[in-house]
Image (spheres, rainbow, N blue to C red):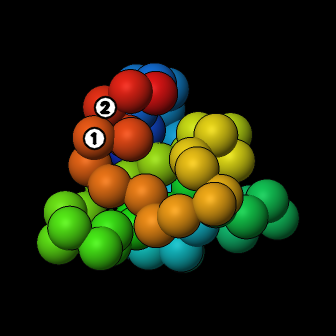
Amino acid sequence: MTSQPCDACGKGVRIAGGIGDLWNFPTSSSGGMTLELVDGSEHFLCFECMEQLPGDREPTAEDVADL
């Protein structure tokens, strides 16, 4: 199992695929993803933090920092 910390909350998030899954074949999916925001920044966020991003406009790095 491979994990990466969420850029907003710091929680370790499972990442599906990769060499770690080659040997143990877990059935669960990833717990987050990398987002490229309109300001050109990239952030790996867990799904819980992604749900907290603004839905009425395009999120920015400032919104991620505010989480």
Observer-nearest residue: 26 or 28?
A: 28
Splitting the image into 4 quarters, where does residue 25 fall? bottom right
* Residue 29 image label: none
Q: Is residue 31 visible?
A: no
Q: Is residue 47 above or below residue 28?
A: above
Which residue is at a point 44% across and 73% down the rendered structure image? 18
Observer-nearest residue: 60 or 5?
A: 60
Residue 30 on image: x %, y %: 64, 61
Question: Which amino acid type is marked by label 2?
Answer: Ala
Q: Is residue 21 above or below residue 66?
A: below
Q: Residue furthest front?
A: 56
Splitting the image into 4 quarters, where does residue 46 fall? top right
Q: Is residue 34 visible?
A: yes
Q: Residue furthest right?
A: 27
Question: Which amino acid type is marked by label 1?
Answer: Glu
Q: Is residue 27 left or right of residue 32?
A: right
Q: Number of callouts in the render? A: 2
Q: Is residue 16 left or right of residue 25?
A: left
Element marked by disc 1: helix
Which residue is at a point 79% across and 59% down the rendered structure image? 28
Label 1, label 2: how many angstroms apart (C-alpha)?
A: 5 Å
Tell me if label 1 and label 2 are in contact, CB under 8 Å: yes
Residue that badge 2 annotates? 65
Observer-nearest residue: 49 or 56?
A: 56
Residue that badge 1 annotates? 62
Residue 57 on image: x %, y %: 53, 64
Element marked by disc 2: helix
Q: Is residue 36 left or right of residue 58?
A: left
